[in-house]
Amino acid sequence: MCGIVGIVHHDVDHPASDLSAALSALAHRGPDDHGSYQNGHMSMGMARLSIIDLAGGHQPMSDDSKRYWIVFNGEIFNYSDLRAELGRLGYSFRSTSDTEVVLVGYRHWGTAVLDRLNGMFAFAIWDQQDRRLWIARDRLGIKPLYYTQLAGAFRFASEIKALLAAPEVPRTLSRIGLLNYLTYGHAIAPDTMFEGIFKLLPGHHLTYHQGTIRVAPYWTVPSSGQPRIESIQDAIQQSRALVEDAVRLHMVADVPVGAFLSGGIDSATVVGLMTRLTGKVKTFSLGFEDDQRNELSAARRLARHFGTDHYEANVSFAELPPLLEKLVYHFDEPFGDASCFPTYLVSRLAQKHVKVVLTGDGGDELFGGYVRYRAERMSPWVQTVPGAVRKLALSTLSTLAPRQHRLKRILRITLQSNPGLRYAGWSEVFSRDLFQQLVSPAFQMANYDVYAPYETLYRTSSALDITNRAMYTDLQMRLPNLYLEKVDKATMAASLEARVPLLDYRLVELAQRIPSTFKVSHRETKILFRQAVADLLPPDILNLPKHGFSVPTRLWFQGQLKDFVRDVLTSRSARERGIFDTSVVESVLDSHVDNRGLYETHLWLLLNFELWAQRYLDPAFVEPEIAASVVPKVTVG
């Protein structure tokens, strides 16, 4: 696991660039080792968190001929099998690292090596002879990779801040990024919040040669679901076998491996299987002192059940303001999921004891864990309700108390007849009307359809049943753009590697073949998965409803943190920037504080945006605390 960066100048006579500033910006991703390679007009470097082959895995790494050079971020979980296969084909190895396996595999199979990799990764391979750069990202988008072609060069990096370390790269707000962020809580790849800086899509690779960029997919989430698994018992058996194998593969490491443990089924399943494989496991949990839904009690019961070496922390609202600026820096873009806050804190706790953790992310998207999937199953029935009754129901929504906001949301969305728009509604934060009131006309885009990305994905999966279409859309939209982004940035900010075994691509492909009736009913979620892991978990945990890793921002923003939020959102910098109508911002805040409406998510988005703009857009940008200037080991071609 590491941070990678590289620069190829358009002008072949341009000298290779010094990467020290970029590598310093990535020091948290790789505190164990640093290195760079320079040749002619090209430079590439890495900051390494050593996990496999601690002594022999130094990067950048070359093949025997010195023609090919690689920088690699992530882990290949089936690298031992690939190494043995390549050995039988006559190749020799100088290390035991998975990085060298990728490089040698590229020499033999070319870009088709991607079809053989089971892992989470973002890497770049430079062909010194042809002066060709090839970069790729894993199938599900677990590891990030950004790029830009600005200021006379092509640049790539694991984080945007490494690209911005070059003063010639501009810091310009993307209007598309802003619109997507306020609507969904995140930018939608390939766009980012910065104009001209892009994110490589999951399952895609990019070739840069002589000033030309070519991007192509090599894998996508299956959208046909064929051939379907017709027996629920077959589905249970195959799912359980693949989950076990995925957890086994994801535990490969030359350093201690632990796990995040919430009170939920997914993380409990991962921990239960880890315990069966290795015995004692270190587990880590976090809760909030002033939250009635504190999940620590369930996590403790699970820790006792599995006999883990358990660590936990209990935090309060007072820890949020001083940490927000740090989180804004590490995420590079304003971020709409408040659970990034506890994810970072539990990562910091875990990093004191292990270098790697396994998480339960992805199980809900594969096996139907969200309430909205139940609502989607009901939507065809709702569409049969006569128009007059629908109109009456909509008018009734405004009379419901704020505490009924969840019911109001479900009714409003399920009454939408367009299925693509309906599903986009489950992720929508700022409605189109509120967005138009809030955002200055100069930053709006009348010709951009913010709902098109969801509608397009939803139409692509038309061969699937209605609930699997929802899960398909989430796997390609919310999962990589929001949840996996959160896990990567929050854990790497603490110099901790997180692995997500439930997103083994083989399990994803299997799940798309399972009818949604095996997963979700009108009353239950995760039907099949609960049966598949029933022998692992205590009954009281197995039957708990989905509750998520929630942060009590609703109460905080109405009470202890309301003055902090108001000070940030009405600050001089916010007013002078002129992006938002401050009177609308204050109206939203007042409505939430007075309990006339619940807008904690809206306020979280606005709060993060303002702190991000102060950090990254304002002229007085100053780097926060990072490692001292890195002096990498430089290899010159």
Image (tube, helix red, strand yellow):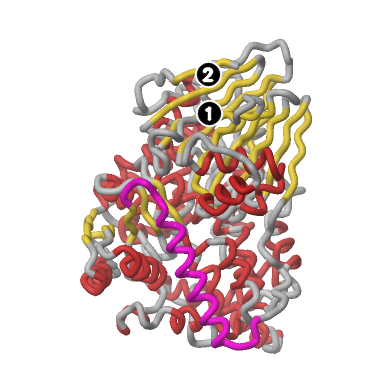
Question: Horizontal placement of 276 versus 499: left or right?
Answer: left
Asked if marks 2 and 1 touch (Cβ < 8 Å), the reply is yes
The kind of secondary structure element at disc 2 is strand
Task: Give me the residue at 71% from left, 10% from top.
Answer: 13
Task: Give me the residue at 26% from left, 58% from top.
Answer: 282
Q: Which mark is residue 463?
A: none
Question: Horizontal placement of 340 versus 107: left or right?
Answer: left
Cα gap from disc 2 to disc 1, whole angstroms: 8 Å
Q: Which of 476 and 394 is in front in this view?
A: 476
Q: In this view, does 430 lie above or below 74?
A: below
Quarter of the image that includes the N terminus? top left
- Write down the quadrant of residue 299 in the picture: bottom left
Q: Residue 635 carries which label?
A: 2
Quarter of the image that includes the C terminus? top right
- Write down the quadrant of residue 118 in the picture: bottom right
Task: Give me the residue at 61% from left, 46% from top.
Answer: 86
Residue on which disc 1 sits: 60
Q: What residue type is labelled 1?
A: Pro
Counting from the top left corner in percent of width and height, residue 604 is at 43, 51
Q: Nearer the viewer, residue 501 or 24?
A: 501
Q: Is residue 412 above or below residue 259?
A: below
Question: Horizontal placement of 469 versus 490: left or right?
Answer: right
**Within-10-Å neighbours for mark 2: few <14, some 14–19, many 20+:** some
The segment highlighted magenta reads: 229-256
Task: Give me the residue at 22% from left, 69% from top.
Answer: 307
The kind of secondary structure element at disc 1 is loop
